[in-house]
Image (spheres, grey):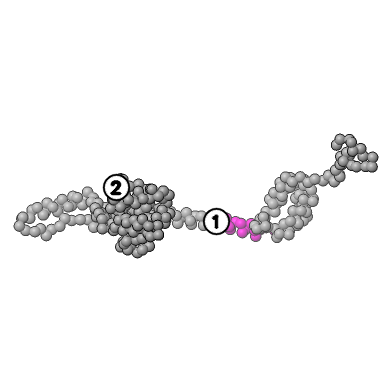
Amino acid sequence: MNYIKHLTGFFDRIVQDRSLNPTHISLYIALFQFWNVNRFQNPISITRDEVMRISKICSKATYHKCMRELNDKGYIKYEPSFNPFKGSMVILFNFSEDLKPVQKRVSNTEKILSNAGQLVNKQQTSDETSTEQALVPSINYINKTNISNDLNLDEQSKNFQIEDEFLKNDNAKKEKKLREKKKNFSTPTNEEIKAYFLEQNFPELEANKFFNYFSSNGWLVGGKTPMVDWQASAKNWMLNSINFKHNTDTTPINRAKHLNTGTDKDYSEPL
């Protein structure tokens, strides 16, 4: 059985049947899944809990009501077992044969040509059978629509290809510039870094920290990206160092005198 034609026939029926709701459709699709698993052999044995789980129906009353209505409307044949240890039997009907033939769209040109052919046929005698046929163009309206859709898809694909090539070229240019900057980068000395930090009115200690840090990780920014401009990295180092407050006061904290105990402590004195 062609299940695609069957489902198409089923949906053609429910479009015309206004008494059905989404719950009926969900229940039928669950039964169709059981039918599909059993290779479309009738009847099939079902269990209420399993069908309710697949169809997402939570109420038993709704389940029995929809099952009875599908049976009454001729979508299925339901034979309940009334036995909790025995499954009910369901027969599903094949709707693939109920499909209506799709009417061919006729353009105005075809109508004119067909009318002309009918006029030619009318000139024949009533006793003779006409051998002439109406001329029909080789490409109909549907094919024209398909051709136009194909052309639109081709144009879209060409536009996507142009955008991809533009992005690839742009990324290639950026990577080329980055490689050139990496080639031009030379590792600065500690003396150069100290002189730069002093020009920016920063202490020599921060210059030593900057040099030691990047010398230890191979001059990588963030531990991953090779450094391109060490002066820009030094400026970032200076900006970040301002955010950190270093406590240089090494004076010991004076404790409260009333917390110190002695031999002449008066314990009757309140704290």
**Quick check: 261 left or right of 73?**
right
| Residue highlighted by disc 2 | 17
Q: Nearer the viewer, residue 254 or 261?
A: 261
Q: Is residue 98 visible?
A: yes
Residue depicted at x 48% and y 57%: 165
Of the two numbered discs 2 and 1 on the same chain, state the one appearing first in sequence: 2
Q: Residues within 10 Å of mark 2 (few under 14, many from 20)?
A: few
Q: Which mark is residue 249?
A: none
Residue 209 spot, x, y in % from top left: 76, 53
* Residue 175 painted magenta: yes
> Which part of the image, by quadrant, shows the C terminus?
top right
| Range covered by the magenta-colored residues | 174-188
Residue depicted at x 16% and y 55%: 134
Residue depicted at x 51% and y 55%: 167
Say which amino acid is labelled 1: Asn
Count every numbered label the image shows and give the total: 2
Residue 196 spot, x, y in % from top left: 75, 50
Say which amino acid is labelled 2: Asp
* Residue 211 painted magenta: no
Q: Nearer the viewer, residue 12 or 202?
A: 12
The answer to whether 173 is drawn above or below residue 245 in the figure is below
Residue 86 spot, x, y in % from top left: 38, 60
| Residue highlighted by disc 1 | 171
Residues at discs 2 and 1 in contact (Cβ within 8 Å): no
Q: Quadrant of residue 186?
A: bottom right
- Point out the frontmost of discs 2 and 1: 2
Which residue extends farthest right? 264
Q: Nearer the viewer, residue 176 or 203?
A: 203
Assign a secondary structure to mark 2.
Answer: loop
